[in-house]
Amino acid sequence: VNSFEKAIAQDTVRNEYVFHAQIHNWFAKGDFVNSDSASLNALNRRVYDQLFLTPASDPWLGLVNENIYTGISSKSE
């Protein structure tokens, strides 16, 4: 439980001070000024590609180390 709580705390800090700040920077630079769906899709792609480092083109996406807690049951029922 301690390692889980520590991971959640680290994730929260990273979200607030790294990811959140970067997204605000993109908006401040005017990268996503349109409110159309194409601009929203481009923003989503950029967030996953550049911030989360999980591009949709990654064939290994979704594979995780078995020692990492995901909250997903290993049983496929």
Image (cartoon, rainbow, N blue to C red):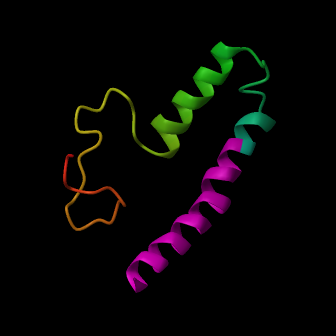
Question: Is-magenta flag for residue 5?
Answer: yes
Residue 76 in the image: state x and y as whole percent: 20, 46
Q: Residue at x 70, y 36 (%)?
A: 26
Q: Relative to residue 53, is residue 15 drawn left or right?
A: right
Tell me if residue 6 comes above or below residue 45 in the rendering.
below
Q: Residue at x 29, y 43 (%)?
A: 62
Which of 9/50 is in front? 9
Q: Residue at x 52, y 28 (%)?
A: 45
Which of 24/6 is in front? 6
Question: Image quadrant of residue 38?
Answer: top right
Q: Which residues are magenta?
A: 1-23
Q: Relative to residue 73, is residue 35 drawn left or right?
A: right
Residue 29 in the image: state x and y as whole percent: 77, 33
Q: Residue at x 33, y 66 (%)?
A: 69
Question: Image quadrant of residue 4?
Answer: bottom left
Question: Is-magenta flag for residue 72?
Answer: no
Tell me if residue 46 comes above or below residue 23 in the rendering.
above
Can you name the residue that lies furthest to the front here?
Answer: 77
Tell me if residue 69 comes above or below residue 77 in the rendering.
below
Residue 51 in the image: state x and y as whole percent: 52, 45
Q: Relative to residue 42, is residue 67 drawn left or right?
A: left
Residue 31 in the image: state x and y as whole percent: 71, 27
Please tell me whether the stretch drawn in magenta is mainly helix, strand or loop.
helix
Question: Image quadrant of residue 56?
Answer: top left
Tell me if residue 45 comes above or below residue 22 in the rendering.
above
